[in-house]
């Protein structure tokens, strides 16, 4: 792979893998379909229970009103609880419902099984290349995250 083509081909491959994983996982899901941003918000609330709407918006790099819309829908669908922050009665804290925890756990288990199944179909050289590339891909994600945080 040419040095100049590498970033473009890498970005295309990552987007393609993510899109195909989402499509495969959508099939057979119980309950209403969750959009990518909804899943991201639920995963963020799972990792940081009690996070506020504006902090979630910053973390997800979305507009506050977009996250408010997502929160309203997820509250209506029974996946989020919005409670008043005792430290600031004007602010809300977000918590997962048991239904959301179950849905996320199912999604994570199905995603792991899907990826495992397809990685196992690769030859050992490709599996070793993926293992070796994983730390570099994590560092790439970190630098992208850091750049997004810099004004």
Image: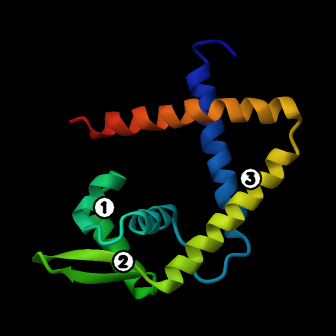
> Mark 1–mark 2 contact, CB under 8 Å?
no
Question: Where is residue 76 shown, x and y percent of the image?
Answer: 40, 87
Whole-angstrom CA distance, mark 3 to mark 2, is: 29 Å
| Residue 96 image label | none
Q: Residue at (50%, 85%) from the top-left corner?
A: 98
Residue 123 vs residue 21: left or right?
right
**In terms of sequence position, does the residue under pointer 3 or pointer 2 come before the other?**
2
Of the 4 image quadrants, the one containing the N terminus is top right
Q: Would residue 33 be seen by someone viewing this image from the given angle? A: no
For disc 1, the neighbor class at 10 Å (few under 14, some 14 to 19, many from 20) is many
Q: Would residue 89 be seen by someone viewing this image from the given angle? A: yes
Tell me the element at label 1.
helix
Question: Where is residue 127 shown, x and y percent of the image?
Answer: 79, 36
Q: Residue at (66%, 44%) from the top-left corner?
A: 16
For disc 2, the neighbor class at 10 Å (few under 14, some 14 to 19, many from 20) is many
Residue 115 lies, with reference to residue 105, above or below; the image says: above
Residue 101 vs residue 93: left or right?
right
**In terms of sequence position, does the residue under pointer 3 or pointer 1 come before the other?**
1
Residue 91 lies, with reference to residue 129, above or below; the image says: below
Location of mark 2 (residue) = 95
For disc 3, the neighbor class at 10 Å (few under 14, some 14 to 19, many from 20) is few
Q: Residue at (51%, 61%) from the top-left corner?
A: 36
Location of mark 1 (residue) = 56
| Residue 115 image label | 3
Tell me the element at label 3.
helix
Q: Residue at (30%, 61%) from the top-left corner?
A: 56
Residue 55 vs residue 26: left or right?
left
Whole-angstrom CA distance, mark 3 to mark 1, is: 28 Å
Quadrant assignment, res 78: bottom left
- Depth order, front residue of 108/71: 108
Whole-angstrom CA distance, mark 1 to mark 2, is: 12 Å
* Number of the front mark, 1 or 2: 2
């Amino acid at each position: 792979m040419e040095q100049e083509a590498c970033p473009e081909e890498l970005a295309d491959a990552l987007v393609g893998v993510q899109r195909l994983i989402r499509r495969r996982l959508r099939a057979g899901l119980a309950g209403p379909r969750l959009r990518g941003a909804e899943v991201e918000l639920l995963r963020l609330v799972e990792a940081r229970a009690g996070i506020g709407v504006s902090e979630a918006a910053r973390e997800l790099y979305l507009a506050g009103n977009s996250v408010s819309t997502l929160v309203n829908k997820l509250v209506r669908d029974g996946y989020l609880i919005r409670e008043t922050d005792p430290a600031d009665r004007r602010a809300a804290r977000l918590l997962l419902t048991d239904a959301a925890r179950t849905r996320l756990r199912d999604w994570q288990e199905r995603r792991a099984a899907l990826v495992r199944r397809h990685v196992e179909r690769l030859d050992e050289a490709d599996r070793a290349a993926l293992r070796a590339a994983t730390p570099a891909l994590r560092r790439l994600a970190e630098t992208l995250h850091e750049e997004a945080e810099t004004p």
